[in-house]
Image (cartoon, rainbow, N blue to C red):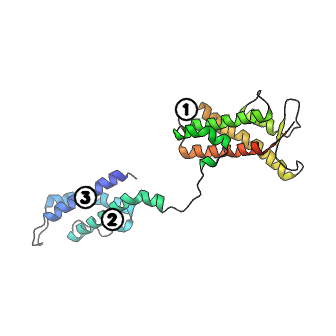
Amino acid sequence: MDRDWMRQRLEEFDELAAKYRASIPRDGKRSGDATLRGELRTAEPTLKKILTCLDPLLATFIDVDRLEGVVRAQASIKRGLGILNDMDDWATRLAPDAPSLPADQFHPWVWDAARTLWESEHYRAAVHAAATSINAHLQTKLGRRDLSDAKLVQEAFSDKAPETGKPRLRIPGDQTDPGVQTRQRGALQLGQGAYFALRNPAAHETGDLAEQEAMEQLATFSVVARLIDQCQVVA
């Protein structure tokens, strides 16, 4: 809704209605200025549309051909302006409680790398910095500099046995347990997906991310970082 336009039209109608009422003779036996009444009639449909959007009851019984209809219109306008003034507060203060996601509780590999860029509202760059940080920590953990990003994640979480120069990461627990094996496969797919779907666009696409979208992407990388951090290196 264009709230500024709605507010302007309500205020204009209220001012016009006040002028019309002032033009009515004191004896109340005659109508007010005919030109003003014509303007009220022209503006009435839009007034009703606006009030119906705000609260359908506000548009009830408005009839500018009757004095009481004009009076009721002004009363409804006052209520409509009150709704417009408070709509933002309603959205924030009356919304159901929802869990929040404090960014400073993300894995430190993610938030320490992203924080400065995030605070300067460079959200895409913050996501890229987080992905780069995880990559660096994973390289250090495995002692590998020959691979990076999705390819490194693939090698790290591979279910193949380690080889010379190719250590693996293993989810803690009994490696014969189906649940552990499932988590191992999931870590591989999640890590690769994060780099393919999130890191690559952050590195190569232009334009910034919306704050909410960037926060969700940082949260994804935080999960990846925790999985890597918790894993055991098998050489």
* Mark 3 → mark 2, Cα distance in angstroms: 14 Å
* Mark 1 → mark 3, Cα distance in angstroms: 46 Å
In percent of the image, x 27 and y 60: which residue is there?
44
Image position, residue 169 (x, y; %): 82, 40
Q: Amino acid at mark 3?
A: Phe
* Precedes in sequence: disc 2 or disc 1: 2
Question: Is 2 on the left or on the right of 16, as rendered?
Answer: right
Question: Is 219 on the left or on the right of 159, as rendered?
Answer: left
In percent of the image, x 37 and y 53: which residue is there?
3
Image position, residue 40 (x, y; %): 22, 60
Image position, residue 227 (x, y; %): 75, 45
* Mark 2 → mark 1, Cα distance in angstroms: 45 Å
Q: Amino acid at mark 1?
A: Thr
Most foreground residue, 53 or 217 = 217
Q: Is residue 25 above or below residue 188?
A: below
Secondary structure beneath dot 2 equals: helix
Most foreground residue, 126 or 81 = 126
* Precedes in sequence: disc 1 or disc 3: 3
Count the labels in the image.
3
Q: Is residue 17 above or below residue 183?
A: below
Label drawn at residue 148: none
Q: Name the residue that disc number 3 marks.
A: 13
* Mark 3 vs mark 2: in front: 2
Most foreground residue, 64 or 16 = 16
Q: Name the residue that disc number 1 marks.
A: 206
Near mark 3 (Cα within 10 A), the count class, few <14, some 14-19 or many ≥20, is many
In percent of the image, x 55 and y 61: which residue is there?
97
Label drawn at residue 79: 2
Q: Amino acid at mark 2?
A: Arg
Secondary structure beneath dot 3 equals: helix
The image quarter containing residue 12 is bottom left
Near mark 1 (Cα within 10 A), the count class, few <14, some 14-19 or many ≥20, is few
